[in-house]
Every structure is written in C-alpha cells, then in structure tokens.
Amino acid sequence: MSFRSFEEILSKCKEQDKPFWRVILEDDMEERLVSEEESFEKMKHLYMSMKGADIAYDEGLKSTSGLVGGDGARISRAVSEGKTLGGPFIGEVMSKALKMGESNACMKKIVAAPTGGACGVIPAVLLTYEEQFGAFLQQMIEAMYVAAGVGQVIAVRAFISGAAGGCQAEIGSASAMAAGALTYLNGGDGESIAHSAAMSLKNLMGLVCDTVGGLVEIPCVKRNVGGAVIAIASADMAVAGIRSQIPPDEVIDAMREVGESLPRTLRETGEGGLAATPTGREIMNRLMK
Amino acid sequence: MNVFDIMGPVMVGPSSSHTAGAVKIGYTARKLMREEIKEAKIFLHGSFLLTGKGHGTDKALIAGLLGMMPDDERIPDSFSYAKERGLEYDFAGIELRSAHPNSVLMQLVGEKGNKMEIIASSIGGSSIVINQIDGVEADITAAYPTLVIKNVDKPGHVSMVTSLLSKHSINIATMKIQRDKRGGNAVMIIECDQELPGEVLELLGNAEGVKKVTYINAVEA
C-alpha cells in the first residue's frame, strides 16, 4: 500500500502529527507485518552495509573493462592537498560517490539505492554528513526512511530503472532521495523534503542512459558525483525556503513523460549518446572480443 | 512497492538485474533441484547474452547454482569455487521466443542424476521469475516462501493441502494449479505469507497422492 504522491505522505504527516520518516516507517510495518524494531533494524543493516562498503574501497581494483578504478582515491588526495574548490564537505561527498560507484563496477558488495548504477549518491551524502556534522545514528536511519519514502513515490509514479526511463530515473531518483534525506537532517520539514526532491529531479530531468558497452561503468560512476552534488544544492535551496514552482508530484509526472518519450537507444541499450561515440564504440568492440 | 524494494538489497555489483537477479535465478534453481548440481548447460538470451559478461551474469548464475546469495563476496570468484565443488558448466547463446530480454535457459543435472530444465528471467531491480520448469509454466518469483507440490491430479488434493496450511496458521498469498492432462501430473505453486516449518513440509511430503514437495524460502534481496 505504497504512497502514490508526496501529497498523500504530507497529508498523513499533518493528520497524525508525525514526521515524514515515521509515516514511511509505519507504512512498512503495516505492509510487511513487522514491528518497529524489525523494520528499523533492517534499515540500519542497509546503512551499516553502506558504511562497510565505503570502508572496503580498494583503489587498486579495476573493473571488467579495465577503465574504472582509482578515481575516488584521486579526488580524496586532491581534497586533502587543498587543491579543490568545493570545500571539505563537497570534496568528501565527491570522493565517496566515486568510490562506491567504482566498487560496484568492480563487483564489490554495495547497497542498491535505488539501483546498483546509482549506489554512490545516497551513501556519499549521508556518510559524509554523519562524519562531518556529528549526527546520531538514530537520525541517520530516520534520514534513510525519508530517502526511501521519496524513492517509493518516484517508483510508483514513474520509474527507477535506466532501461525504463533513462538515467534521470536512476541518478535522478537517487539524487532526489538524497536531497530529501539531507533536508531532513538539516532541519527541513515534510514540505521542504518534497521540494528538495523535486528540485533535484528538475536538475537531472532528461538525463539519458547511454552506458558504454552496456556496462554500469561509463558514465555511471561519475554521474554519481553529479547526483550527490545536486542533492546538496537542492537541500540547501529547500532549507533556505526556496520552493519548486511546479508541485513535486507534477515534477515526477513530467519526468515519467520525458522518460517515456526517450528513444530506445538512450535507455540502457548501449546504442546512443556516449556509447555511440567513436571511442565508445571502440571500447565496446574491444569488450566483445 | 515496499520501501525495501527501493532501498537495498545489499548486493555484489554491478547490476541489480544482470548480477543480483542472476544470482537469485541460480539460487532458486538450486533450491528446486534439492541436490548439489554437477552439470549445468546455460543458454543466455537477449541482454543477458549481449552485456552479461561485462556484468558478471555468468559468474552470478554459477554462484547461485552453488547456493550463494546476491550479497556473497565470493561471487566474482564463483568459477573457481565451481571447479572445487565439481560443477561443470558451459555457456552458449540462444534465441528464446517471446522471452524477457534478461532471460536464461538452464539444463541442470544433479549429483543423484536428477535432471531439470528451467527458463527464468530477471525482470527489473533484482526481481526474478522462474517461467518454466521442465516445460510446465511455473511463474515462481521467490519473493515469498514458495511451495511447489507435484501431485496426482485427483479430487481432494488441493483442499487437503490448503486445509493443512490453514491448520498451521499459514496464509496463502497466491496459488496456481497446473496439470499436463486430466488425471495426470499436477503442480501446485503456492506463495505463502509465512515461512513453513519443517514438520508441515514433512506432513505434506507424506500426504497421499503427493509425489514431491519442494520448498523455496523467500530470497532476501
């Protein structure tokens, strides 16, 4: 009995005077017939697995194509040497997003959030927030419920797979989920959460899925960085009181329409966009041998 | 759509459909066989064939056949575990008629010589469906605890099974009944809301007219 709109979630929050995360948690309890503890432990397990995956990063690993690996460590070094412009928070978020995307491409254990290709976005912002702003674990798990609730509305109303709706459905959804979670952590109310998610989706609307050789490598790994940074910007805008002039639910509907009108070549077939460039084709031919 | 369909699973990358889903297909097939698999002829269809190698679909299927789950960190090295456990396998391409793009046909032989042919698809996220077992439509998703009961097609067997389940407070979520011909071999596929205790499985296995009971616990992920 998932929520079909932000409006539904927000009116439930209001009716029952409960925060966004609790409404999502209680919905899970009702649907899977589990206790609050059981649901919470399951979500905690996912969060702790994200942490574990971040720590397990190995910069020496290379993906199947041999083209992915080591970039997370590169940006990390540049940040610690003071060479980057984005400051320590964004620097660490970028590094964690790359690391998780690389680990995924290298067949390491990750948490799909919502997919494998977009697995870096949410842990990048949440783990860095916890490290640098000293939040309690309880709050972090609550933020995970916020992210999951945002993702659920997108999944029901539109889609969360690149094959169905292009990269906007994967990185776009992950970014919206991350934005909602960050907005919550930074003191935003339910309405701000919905608007931060909408602003992320708007910024990534139309993004195509053009995986080189059909693999979850190029450009997926680096797009996790974009999704994470846009999530931070969207959360900051929402907390500042900026609102999406198009209501959040309508933004999701627009994203669905855009996704449905994308040609097949730009929906995870490895036949369009970057995949169709001379270099993209050359890589694919090499892989097919 | 539950929140944990959105967040998670914990899985070995890179792709929920081509890697985690493939592990689940192998794992479910292993459960259906109910014995160690010694021989596997694997035919990849569609996107599984085109991009499977880069996604580790081959390693994932073998890992599942060895009983590994989608979050098992040994998945990338499953070929060497297969060698250790004496599982022989080969891969080929196939064109299956009107199949989902991420599909596979597997011909399996177990250590006791039992044979099984299944067609399965990874249908998005890490959701899977076993479409066919030995040519019979199956439609098993492994998202719920699932009972596959082969029985003789005679009156009373279905109600015997359902009343036994209800007596043990097990709620049936979905149920499908198939048979090859009147009075011939029938299959009941029952998805339940609760895990089934061993004693219930034993009672079912010993019941009159029941030929074989296979139980697949829900695969997390």
Image (cartoon, rainbow, N blue to C red):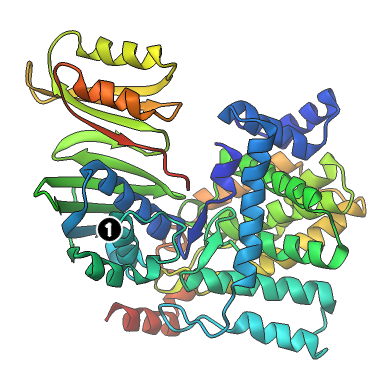
Residue A230 screen position, x and y as percent: 74, 64
Image mark 1: chain? B
Residue A3 percent location from the top left of the image: 65, 32
Q: Is residue B137 left or right of residue A8?
A: left
Left or right: where A137 falls relative to A73 = right
In percent of width and height, residue A5 lies at: 68, 34
Q: Nearer the viewer, residue B93 or A283?
A: B93
Question: Which image quadrant for residue A129?
Answer: bottom right
Q: Residue at x 68, y 72 (%)?
A: A96
Q: Residue furthest front?
A: B199
Count of all numbered marks drawn on residues in the image: 1
Q: Is residue B30 above or below residue B60?
A: above
Residue bearing mark 1: B46
Q: Residue at x 77, y 44 (%)?
A: A194
Q: Residues within 10 Å of mark 1 (few under 14, many from 20)?
A: some
Tell me which corner region of the image, top left, top right, bottom left or bottom right, holds residue B47.
bottom left
Residue A236 coordinates in the image, percent (x, y): 86, 59
Q: Is residue A35 above or below residue B162?
A: below
* Amino acid type, mark 1: Gly
- Quarter of the image with the C terminus of chain A is bottom left
Q: Nearer the viewer, residue A146 or B108?
A: B108
Considering depth in this image, is A266 or A146 the residue closer to the camera? A146
Viewer can see residue B6: yes
Q: Is residue A154 left or right of residue B54?
A: right
Q: What residue is drawn where x is 30% and y is 65%?
A: B58
Question: Which residue occupies the extreme right position in the image?
Answer: A240
Residue B190 in sight: no
Dot 1 falls on a residue whose secondary structure is: strand
Q: Quadrant of the N terminus of chain A?
A: top right
- Compared to residue A168, the image places residue A224 above or below, namely below
